Image: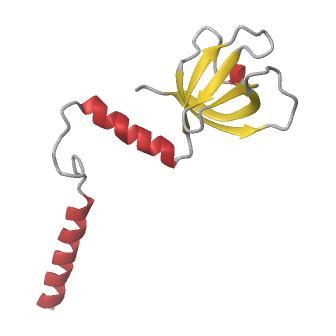
Amino acid sequence: MKNILKTCFVLISLISYSCITTQGADGKKGENGKESAQIIDSKEMIEKGFIKGTLSINKSKDCSYILTVEKYADKLDPINIQDFFKTDDMPEKVWVKYSNLRMNSRCKEARPVSIQEISNRTD
């Protein structure tokens, strides 16, 4: 009976020790807490399927915003961008999930896409 209790105690203590969060992979804190938080945030967003993008204003009235995706260096025309942001507070750097559209392009330099999810990016 004592052996079973000792074994259970050892197992519970090992499990609880493994559940304690660490400060980093090497056990050290980073110099700047924001930098490490941004790196973790970037990894999380990439794991969730988001891609880094940059929004810019286009002079054409047909496609007023151009989304440049860093992963592919591709220029996209987000047709439903107003569903997510008001024109006054449009961010420049974003995390985005999008799907391609099979429709005629509204502007010459970008292909049309539909945004599925989008959020601000701080880096």
Q: Position of residue 102 (x, y in %)?
A: 85, 38
Q: How many marks?
A: 0
Q: Position of residue 117 (x, y in %)?
A: 63, 35
Question: Which residue occupies the extreme right position in the image?
Answer: 104
- 1 vs 117, left or right, is left
Q: How is the image coloured?
A: secondary structure
- 40 vs 85, left or right, is left
- 11 vs 58, left or right, is left
- 27 vs 109, left or right, is left
- Residue 49 against residue 2 in the figure, above or below: above
Of residue 25 and residue 8, the one placed in the foreground of this image is 25
Screen quadrant of the C terminus: top left
Of residue 80 and residue 77, the one placed in the foreground of this image is 77
Screen quadrant of the N terminus: bottom left
Residue at the spot 67% in from the left edge and 21% down from the top edge:
66
Q: Position of residue 35 (x, y in %)?
A: 29, 32
Of residue 36 and residue 53, the one placed in the foreground of this image is 53
Residue at the spot 63% in from the left edge and 19% down from the top edge:
85
Q: Quadrant of residue 114?
A: top right
Q: Position of residue 78 (x, y in %)?
A: 71, 26
Residue at the spot 49% in from the left edge and 49% down from the top edge:
47
